[in-house]
Image: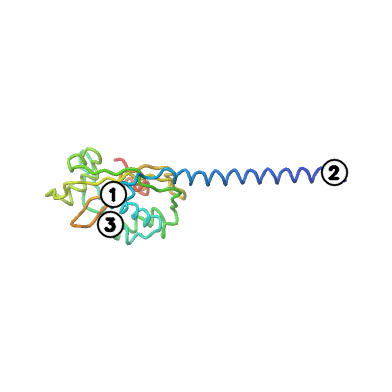
């Protein structure tokens, strides 16, 4: 009888500790989400059309709506010359979709945003853009050699991902241009030799 009572006390204690542990873990998860939401953008960032456009593209990314997303993305293609990588064209829409499916899964099943926000927005002249994002500037030079695009808009996005993506917390400058009345994101892309980390480009620029 005493043995049964002792066992019952131990069992009850274990259950109680497990319940407390689960509550703590749940609280941590909720606190993480709430904390992320508390870091809200300034009103000027929230109301900006460029910012809303970029956030919408990340929403499409998470939902796996790659066909729609590919209409709004310019991604560079690269080849190596004797000294450096140079642009050799643009990734075609069909290839953008296929690459996203390979990187993040059909329907975006490999990606989930715990938090996603725009934390900064600014516009810069074309010349200054060259010093901030060299590779993206090279892509812009290729598609706009006459330099009709004089201003580039930069949206600084940040987030916390879960899923199979190797990036967890990230902070990324996303350039947007107005190309003949249509907003477009310039994505750096990556040479073929960097294909294994291509999936990271939406969260941090691949350096090469």
What element does badge 2 sit on?
A: helix
What element does badge 1 sit on?
A: strand
Residue for badge 2 = 3
Mark 2 closeness class: few <14, some 14–19, many ≥20 residues within 10 Å:
few
Q: Can residue 205 be seen in this snapshot?
A: no
Q: Is residue 94 above or below residue 114?
A: below
Mark 3 closeness class: few <14, some 14–19, many ≥20 residues within 10 Å:
some
Q: Earlier in the sequence, mark 2 or mark 1?
A: 2
Find the distance from the CA under tag 1 to the CA under tag 3.
Answer: 10 Å
Colour approach in the figure: rainbow
What element does badge 3 sit on?
A: loop
Find the distance from the CA under tag 2 to the CA under tag 1.
Answer: 68 Å
Q: Earlier in the sequence, mark 2 or mark 3?
A: 2
On the rendered structure, is 110 left or right of 206?
right
Q: Earlier in the sequence, mark 1 or mark 3?
A: 3
Q: Can residue 180 be seen in this snapshot?
A: yes
| Position of residue 96 measured from the top left corner of the image (x, y, whole percent) | 31, 56
Q: Nearer the viewer, mark 1 or mark 3?
A: 3
On the rendered structure, is 162 left or right of 92?
right
Q: Is residue 123 above or below residue 107?
A: above
Observer-nearest residue: 109 or 169?
169
Total labels drawn: 3
| Position of residue 187 measured from the top left corner of the image (x, y, whole percent) | 28, 49
Residue for badge 3 = 72
The furthest residue to the front: 43
Find the distance from the CA under tag 2 to the CA under tag 3.
Answer: 70 Å
Residue for badge 1 = 187
The furthest residue to the left: 146
């Amino acid at each position: 009888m005493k043995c049964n009572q002792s066992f019952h006390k131990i069992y009850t204690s274990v259950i109680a500790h497990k319940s407390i542990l689960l509550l703590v873990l749940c609280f941590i998860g909720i606190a993480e989400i709430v904390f992320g939401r508390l870091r809200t953008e300034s009103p000027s960032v929230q109301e900006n059309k460029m910012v809303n456009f970029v956030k919408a593209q990340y929403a499409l990314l998470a939902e796996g709506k790659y066909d729609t997303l590919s209409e709004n993305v310019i991604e560079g293609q690269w080849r190596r010359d004797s000294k450096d990588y140079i642009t050799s064209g643009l990734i075609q829409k069909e290839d953008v979709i296929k690459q996203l499916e390979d990187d993040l899964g059909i329907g975006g099943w490999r990606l989930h945003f715990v938090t996603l926000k725009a934390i900064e927005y600014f516009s810069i002249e074309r010349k200054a853009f060259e010093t901030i994002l060299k590779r993206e500037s090279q892509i812009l030079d290729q598609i706009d050699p006459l330099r009709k695009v004089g201003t580039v808009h930069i949206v600084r996005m940040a987030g916390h991902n879960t899923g199979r993506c190797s990036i967890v917390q990230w902070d990324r400058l996303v350039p947007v241009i107005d190309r003949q009345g249509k907003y477009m994101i310039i994505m750096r892309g990556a040479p073929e030799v960097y294909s294994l980390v291509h999936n990271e480009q939406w969260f941090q620029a691949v350096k090469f």
